Image (tube, grey):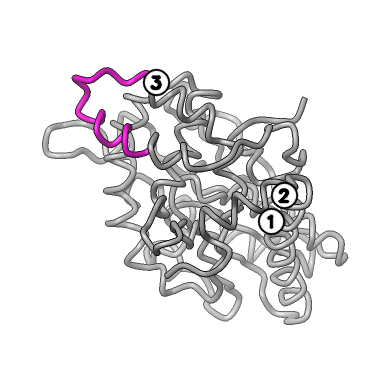
Amino acid sequence: MANKNNTVEYIKTAAAEPEKFIAQCENRYNNKIKKIARDIAESGRTEIVMIAGPSSAGKTTSAKKLREHLLDLGINSHTVSLDDYYVDNCDAPRFPDGTPDFETVDALDIECFQKTMTELLSNSEAYLPEFDFLTGKRKSEYRHVKIQEGDVIIVEGLHALNPKITDHLPAERLLKIYINISSRIYDENGNIVLNKRNMRFIRRMVRDYKFRGNSVQKSYEMWITVRYGEDTYLFPFKNNADIRLNTIHLYETCVLKDLAINLLSELPKDSEFYKESQRLISSLEKFPSINSECVPADSLLREFIGAKE
């Protein structure tokens, strides 16, 4: 349901003072990360933090910020990305039509993950794989990681809450975090203007255009598979989390709006996604614009719009 903050009307009013609005949103998110870091420090037990979330929820930035806040508390940490455990593309599981299924947990080399995590926990060091997404293969060089007593290991990825991953780790040493945009945006009558998936799609569409050269048509086509992966391999396990983190930044639609509308407007009328794109345009037009230069250099939104110049 709508509250006084997650409405178009509130956002319009707040956006009249963009710097203040942005600071409020950034502080809300950062304070939640800081609290998680403090809780980890005070527990004295957790050594492995599992961070899972759907596409464009902000897993990478959240893991980075958690590392920074832990360091402020005198705790070293090391990030392990489950994406580095993908099997080579040629060995990936297949859909019935023969196309690769990169969303399934079985697209990961789970045995390799178990082996390297066991080595890290038992011997305090291990050689971790790195995946090259350009070649679709694991790199020949492995990354050496060495941990000290009291260090924290942060594992992030779509499948970080999946029992196929977590059941082979010591439960008493785990903290499980589920990250997502967990709020909708409503109008003054309580009607949904943007749902949670709408906002993640807008983030991803902008990111994929800016950094991967993908067209909106391509983004929509990929989104079908992404949604399948989330519904099948992530959402059933989100209740396994100890902590849920809402990564919405209420000002984000104001920043993403103009580029998103321009991109969506490029879809031809004969596209199967044309009607959906027009609905999104209509929703985005309800929001005021905020210049992306106002976004802090360390903001989660920089994951999608790029570094500050």
N-terminal of the two: label 3 or label 1? 1
Q: Position of residue 195 (x, y in %)?
A: 39, 54
Q: Would you place residue 3 above or below residue 184 in this image?
A: below
Say which residue label 2 marks: 22
185 over 267 or under it: above or below: below
Q: Which residue is mark 1?
A: 25
**Left or right: 37 as drawn, with respect to 238:** right
Q: Position of residue 149 (x, y in %)?
A: 79, 68
- Give the amino acid type for the residue marked by disc 1 in the picture: Cys
Mark 3 Cα-neighbour bin, 10 Å: few <14, some 14–19, many ≥20: some
Q: What is the CA distance from the residue labelled 2 to the residue labelled 3?
A: 29 Å
Rendering quarter of residue 211: top right
Whether label 3 touches label 1, CB < 8 Å: no
Queried whether the magenta region covers residue 278, the answer comes back as yes
Of tags 2 and 3, which is closer to the observer? 2
The magenta-colored residue range is 266-280
Classify 184 as above or below 80. Answer: below
Contact, mark 1 vs mark 2 (Cβ under 8 Å): yes
Residue depicted at x 53% and y 42% = 287
| Residue in the picture at 42% in, 70% down | 1
